[in-house]
Each structure stands twice: as structure tokens, then as C-alpha cells.
Amino acid sequence: MPFFDQAASFQEHWEGIAKHLDDVLDNGKFSHGAKVAELEERLADWTGARHAVAVNSGTDALVLLLRAAGLEPGDEVVVPAFSFIATASSVVLAGGVPVFADIEERGHGLDPRAAEAAVTARTRMIMPVHLFDRMADLRGLGAVARRHGLTIVEDSAEAIGMRMDGVHAGLHGAGGVLSFFPAKTLGGIGDGGAVLTDDESVAETARMLCHHGRGGRTLDNFPGISNATVVPGRNSKMDDVQAAVLQAKLTGLDAAIARRAGLAARYDARLSGVPGVLDVPGSLPPPPGSDRVSYVHLLRVEDRDALAAHLAARGIETEVYYPVPLHLQPCFAHLGHRPGDFPRAEKACAEALAVPLYPDLPDEHVDRVCDEIERFYTGTPR
Ligand SMILES: *Cc1c(COP(=O)(O)O)cnc(C)c1O
């Protein structure tokens, strides 16, 4: 049983995908074509963002967002010690310095009190991350940001479909991002991402930096031989083929999210209370005013590595999100952190195990995974 598979979804959406792909093939515009702009409009529509800028990955979206939101060289950004590496590496790539803070006692979000304690005179931004199935405590973190005059930028790469107080993830501060990495809730046929923002100047700057500092998306914006560049940008554009596929997949997104919720509930009903299973996602309600969208189904378990090996031996793939906390990553050794600095993040890294969850997963596979987890801890499935 693979950890992730979308072959059946692709079959199911093939007609829509083929139609959009045909448009791209017909006019041969694999870059600077119409599909990317169309996708941006549809993403803005779906999320309620005033602007969406489609790019080549969630990681580049974060780098562009940080720069567009005004990060200056040497500025500090408070980030959780528990996240995907891109949360912190994007800060470095944008010229800033990541400053780590621990996560909440329960859940996996940046803890507002820890974030406030990490603020210094050089802090410019706070970057909450919405991990797995829930948003971070944006009310608490927003209050910290206001007290210290800081900008909130959201690593909402995993958070498509998550809303708090009716506002989509990524739109609670200067902006946020989406990732369309194939395994994400809205996954493409390769890498992709987007910047989401309600702020016109953030959108404009991100758009400009995304293409060599030259702004606009079509070559028509640069008549004649003009190649004037205001600032050194990069090439982070999304390809039209990717945008074509994502448009087709976007049509099925609501159904995919509902299917994910059903699978998550099925896991939780079977696994809560099983000895050895320390926590299931459904035991903790999402923060007030927000809803749950299950991207990754992350259990907290005893003897994590032995359980993963037991499942692997029975053909069930699992993943550890995330094996090494950010402050102990070799690339941040120069920041001088030691084990024990962020105990909650380190505990999460030791206990976390993600089980397969994706729309194509049959219910019976969930039951099989649960049987095997129970067998591992109790000797017999219920
Ligand atoms: C996936 C992800 C990213 C980066 O997205 P890519 O598209 O893989 O570059 C950033 N942050 C988090 C929390 C993610 O899960």
C-alpha cells in the first residue's frame, strides 16, 4: 500500500485534464500562455484572495512572498522549530535570519508565547505554519504581531481549503503560499506553487521578482526590445502544462477534501484509545473559528520506528513528518542550537508517524492499516 497514489484520480479527471492540455498544445504556448493567468484567476476565486501569483514551487512562493512583503537583509523571522525545511530555508534564501520558537503543547502550530519570547529588536516578521490538518493559532500570533509591530506571513503550503473566521489560510497577514507538489491536497504532475495575498503591492512585487524583475506575465508587456529590469529577480514561473493540469484538478478539489475528511474520521474512530497510539488528529479540535482539512494524517505513537518497520514489513508505507526539527538541521548548525532547546518540537519529531491518506485510498485499506497498528501494540486487532 503506497503512502501516496493519484493514478485513479488522474483517470477520473482525465477528460478535463486532456481538454486543458489540448489548449496548451494547440497554441504551443508552454510558457507565458493563457493557462497560468486562468489558473491564477480561479485560485483567487476559490480561496477568496484578491491576488494569486502562480509559480514553480511552494518554496519559491515563500521566498518571493518574504521579499515582496518587505523582508530586508538581516531581518529576523520567527518560525516554528517543527516544520518542513522550506519554512526556514526560504527565510535564508530571501536574505533573512530564521529564529526558531517552540510549538504548542498540543497540535503542531507555532506557540504564541514562545513566538513572543523569540522577538528581538531585529525581528520583522512572524511566519506561522499550518500543518497537516489545522491552522496555527492565528488569533494569538496576530496579537503578538500587533504588540511588536511585526508582519505576519503564512506558510500555508499545506493549507488549501483551510479557513479561519471565513478567511482562507494565507490571507490573515501580508500573504501566504500554496504548494502543488503532487502529494499535496491540490497536487499537480510536478512541482508548482502560488503566492496568495490581498495586498496589491505584494502581488505586484512577487509577480515582478518571479520573472527576472520584469513583472507581467506575457511577452506583450515588453514591446520591442525592452528588457529593463528594476531589481535582480529569478525565474520562478509556473509552466502552462502544470497550470492546465491544476485547473482540471481544481474542479474536483471540494470532493477530494470531503473524501479526505471521511478517511480521517475512519482512522480516528478505529485508532483512538488503542494502547500505544498516543494521539490521533481528531482528538484536538481545530483552533476556534477554523475548520479541519486533512492533508496528512499524523499520529503520535510509542515506539514509532518499530511500528513503521512492522507496517513496512506488511507492505504499508508510512512517512515521518518531520524527522529532524529545524533548529537541529545541519544547515542551521551555525545558529548554535542544542537538543533540548525546543522540547515540544523534538518530541513531535520522535513520535510522529503519518499513515496513508489520499482520495484514492479505499476504506478497506484504512481498516488494514488500523488492524496492523492494533496487532503491533496489542497482539490482536479488535
Ligand atoms: C510542501 C511544503 C512547502 C514547500 O512546497 P514545495 O512546493 O514542495 O516547494 C513549504 N512548507 C510546507 C509546510 C510544506 O508542507
Image (cartoon, rainbow, N blue to C red):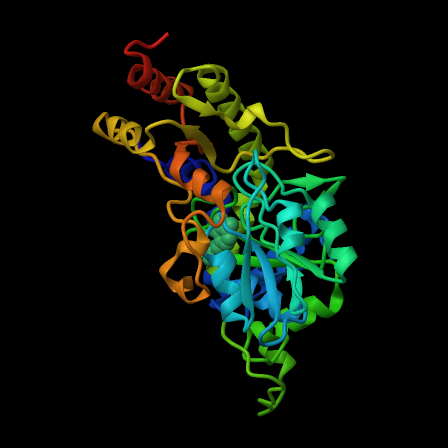
- Which x, y percent locates residue 68? 65, 70
Residue under the image location 60 percent in, 66 percent down: 76
Front residue of 366 and 119: 119
The answer to whether residue 163 is left or right of residue 232 is: right
The answer to whether residue 272 is left or right of residue 164 is: left
The answer to whether residue 142 is left or right of residue 88 is: right
Counting the numbered discs, the total is 0
Front residue of 293 and 72: 72
Say above or below: 33 vs 152: below
Quadrant of the image for the C terminus? top left
Quarter assignment of residue 198: bottom right
Say above or below: 310 vs 74: above
Residue under the image location 67 percent in, 35 percent down: 287
Say if residue 22 shows up in the picture.
Answer: no
- Which x, y percent locates residue 303? 32, 28
Residue positioned most to the left: 313
Residue under the image location 75 percent in, 66 percent down: 200
- Which x, y percent locates residue 131? 54, 43
